[in-house]
Amino acid sequence: MKRIKKDEYGSFRINLKKLMDDNNISINEMSRYANVRYETVRKYYNNDCYWYDAEILAKFCYVLECKINELLIYEPTKTLQNVRIYN
């Protein structure tokens, strides 16, 4: 077994752009509906975030009437076969 490296465990991406586009909601409208700053919505919309705020994600899910797994997508880079995670 080997230790897991940073580039092996994958990453998250936010699917906000597709969901907003599918619902014909602009960044400005989402900002008003969710009571989130325009610049913050724009960063999420462009998938330009390094961390995700749970309260903001909940607001987006509420406005879009979607589940978190539709909004936040996990993209693995490798399987966990033969990889052991040490604390």
Image (cartoon, rainbow, N blue to C red):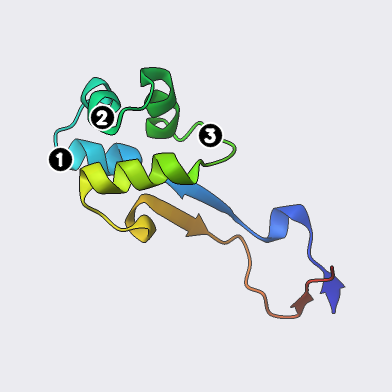
Amino acid tagged 2? Met
Residue 3 position (above or below residue 43)? below
C-alpha separation, residue under disc 1 versus residue under disc 2 = 11 Å
Q: Is residue 77 visible?
A: yes
Q: Nearer the viewer, residue 67 or 82?
A: 67
Q: Nearer the viewer, residue 79 or 27?
A: 27
At mark 3, the secondary structure is loop
Amino acid tagged 3? Cys
The residue at 42%/19% (across/down) is 39
The residue at 31%/28% (across/down) is 35
Can you give x and y, in whole percent of width and height, for residue 64 in the image? 22, 45
As drawn, the label of residue 30 is: 2
Residue 10 position (above or below residue 59)? below
As drawn, the label of residue 3 is: none
Closer to the observer: label 1 or label 2? 2
| Badge 3 vs badge 1, beta-carbon distance below 8 Å | no
Q: Is residue 17 left or right of residue 65?
A: right
The residue under label 3 is 49
Picture quarter containing residue 43? top left
The residue under label 1 is 23
The residue at 30%/48% (across/down) is 61
Q: Earlier in the sequence, mark 2 or mark 3?
A: 2
